Amino acid sequence: MAIRLYMDVHIPGAITLALRARGVDVLRAQDDDADELDDSDLLDRASSYGRVLFTYDDDLLAEASRRMEWGRGFHGIVYTEATRLSIGATAHDLELLAKVLDPGEMLDRILFLPL
């Protein structure tokens, strides 16, 4: 079973389009009327759908770390800095993660790009 992704509001639409063109299941916060949610609620929303959250927001790393410390689960986060990778390289790495990893492997886990 492939990983399904949930894109944070600040992720460029070109990444989402590239992933969808490659057959990756992606939902954007904007498409889910979640673009105004705070970090904790956004992570809850992604997890409620069984989706891994992709973000550039390092505040979400702090939120995930707290949850790991408290034993409060989430479906995973993939993080990179906004300027670290090109759109194409980001889409490539996310596609690889989505198609190779099992959703269970992402539970309560943070992965950093580039791979």
Image: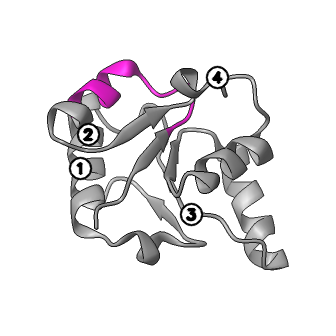
Circle 3 SS class: loop
Sequence-first tag of 4 and 3: 4
Would you name the residue on which mark 2 appears? 91
Would you name the residue on which mark 4 appears? 33
Tell whether 18 sits left or right of 14.
left
Q: Position of residue 33 (x, y in %)?
A: 64, 22
Sequence-first tag of 3 and 1: 3
Which residue type does callout 3 highlight? His
Which residue type does callout 1 highlight? Glu
Tell whether 112 sits left or right of 99.
right
Q: Residue at x 43, y 31 (%)?
A: 83
Magenta-tinted stretch: 7-18
Answer few, some or many: residues within 10 Å of disc 4's Cα (few below 14, many 20 plus, some between 14 and 19).
few
Q: Quadrant of the C terminus?
A: bottom left
Q: CA distance from mark 2 to mark 4?
A: 23 Å
Position of 19 relative to 109 (above/below): above
Would you name the residue on which mark 3 appears? 75
Sequence-first tag of 1 and 4: 4
On whether residue 14 falls in the magenta region, the answer is: yes
- State yes or no: discs 3 and 2 in contact (Cβ < 8 Å): no
Q: Position of residue 27 (x, y in %)?
A: 44, 35
